[in-house]
Image: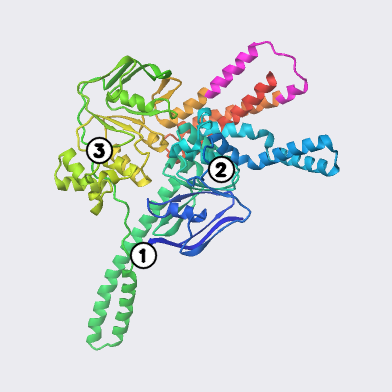
Amino acid sequence: MIDISVNSLVKSFELGKNILDGLSFTVNSGERVGILGHNGCGKTTLFRILSGQLRPDEGEVMVAPSKRLGLVSQIPVYPEGWTTEQVLKQAHRRLYDISRRLDELSLQLEKEQSRTLLTEYDRLQEDFRRLGGYEMDTERSRVASGLDISPAMLSQSFDSLSGGEKTRVNLARLILEDTDILLLDEPTNHLDLRSTEWLEDYLLRFKGTVLVISHDRYFLDKVVQRSIEISEGKAEFYSGNYSFYVQERQRRFEEKLKKYEKDQAKIEQLTRAAEQMHLWAFMGNDKLHKRAFSMEKRIEKLSRSERPTEQKKLSIKFKERQFSGDEVLVMDDVSKGFGDRLLFSGLNMEVTGGERIALIGDNGTGKSTLVKLIMGEETPDTGYLYKGPAVRTAYLPQMVSFSRDDRSALDTMLYDCRCQPQEARDRLAAFGFRGEDVFTPVGALSGGEKSRLRLCMLMGGEINFLILDEPTNHLDIASREWMEDALSDYEQTLLFVSHDRYFIEKFATRIWALADEKITDFRGGYRDYCQWKSRQQVFTQVEKRQEREKKPKPQRPKNNDKTIARLEREIQRLEDRSAQLDKLSEEFASDYQKLLEIGSQKEELENQLLELYEKWEELEK
């Protein structure tokens, strides 16, 4: 069954320039589709048309009439003074209406035992049960917790929330409403790792249809089943996730390039032949003119094809300062808090030259504060931080600012980096600032453009300790890849805060996981860390089970014994399968695509194990 049909869609905002130019595609019920393309290609415009916010200039859009569609980037206006909890309760407004009517009927039935009233009461009570009325408070708490909506935020006025917080609340409301078709426009932008993983798990279990725009490549790999790229206003189709899209797009480019080169060789061959035919025709064989003209028509047809081009990669590299010494950074018993709230304490860490460290953790755990301590912008409450004398640090903050907002990007480079005009233009061009863009005042740049400009400026200095705070937060996929190209050749020490798991997996050789006022220091990549963390959770569950086995067991009904035995057999089967997946991970350590598949199976398996442990625990009580 088709949920969404888009046919020959055309939309323009400038005269003579169509942002969507004959876009056509269909989405079947239950599909999870990634909408890809460079910034400005029309992805968000498409979502606004699908949700009814915009009308197309031409073409038509059809959404299955029985399906409810929700757009995450569209935040409705609520009555003044409404709290976040009231907004979330709107998702269950039908259940609350039923509950109020049941209360009214109950009062009436105390006075009059009418068959009509009893029939209506029974029907509404069954509807309340069937629609999840008895579980709605639990479900609301589960979704709010998963999306990091704290109890304090629930009681807060919705109007007072930040843009990112409003987006999270709106996403939670759509999930609670059990929307049939979800349009997600950058859903992970304001989520930490835990919340992003919760959303991924939800979408993998979601029975409806999902269209998602995202720059989070790891998220796209895990959630998306197929991809639609908007290119020059039209749709290009890819039958897989983001990694498949990257490989297939490159394969198609190479095919087009081979065809173009083959056509050029054919043109050259036909041109020589046509010239020879004309020459022979002048020597008395007029029929050869016809054959030459036929060849020239083929040449004209072949000449219409243009040479395919691909995105230029970043050509500028960091200027590195050679590190000499044993210690880049030392932390000794460092603690920091604000008021009554302690962020972390007792941190004892040592960083040596060439390490690449990812600092991860939930929002609000103190990651940015720790970075500020390292940069000397904050002072620790206890302990000390020490950087070696040969260390030269460069820092890309989460919120980028410049000395003067009225200066253009070019003038900012000239004044702050003291480089020559041509060098400044070359470096700016490598980061996407071309033509008139270099004269844009830096105060008018978007958050992503400011980050790109600041990184471009950092590349000019000699550094050996680079610190990045959410470096990919405001960047599109192309800009993230530019940054990764630059960092790939950087061989000195790197410390970065990020929720971008694709970026973390690519660069981290060491993980600092900040949680519960302390850092878990794991030496290895992100995927290794996730597997280790999953094993620790299983070990913890096993330890709890062993502790319970040591305690005297209360009498329980005999019919529970069979259920417990069945659960234990299932747990053993899943644990054996988990061990097999660990062996497969080692076997395919260099196959990224295979590791993705194994990691997905492993995560699903761990979730099943945890559910079984909980059921086993309940029966054992």
Is residue 217 placed above or below 134 in the rendered structure? below
Q: How is the image coloured?
A: rainbow
Q: Are marks 2 and 1 in contact (CB under 8 Å)?
A: no
Is residue 598 in view from this perspective? no
Say which label, 3 or 2, has the lower sequence index. 2
Residue 34 in the figure: left or right of residue 261: right
The answer for how far apart the CA atoms under marks 3 and 2 are is: 39 Å
Residue 382 in the figure: left or right of residue 204: left
Amino acid type of the residue tagged 2 in the rendering: Leu
Q: Residue at x 45, y 41 (%)?
A: 593
Position of the C terminus, as image quadrant, is top right
Residue 439 in the figure: left or right of residue 380: left
Q: Around disc 1, counting alpha carbons within 10 Å, would you say few (fewer than 14), some (14 to 19), or many (20 or more)? A: few
Is residue 211 placed above or below 470 in the rendered structure? below
Q: Residue at x 24, y 83 (%)?
A: 280
Range covered by the magenta-colored residues = 537-563
* Nearer to us in this view, 309 or 252: 309
In the picture, the disc for residue 15 is 1
Amino acid type of the residue tagged 1 in the rendering: Leu
In the picture, the disc for residue 174 is 2
* Percent position of residue 248, x then y: 42, 51
* Nearer to us in this view, 436 or 406: 406
In the picture, the disc for residue 402 is 3
**Is disc 3 placed on a helix, strand or loop?**
loop
Q: Residue at x 24, y 36 (%)?
A: 458
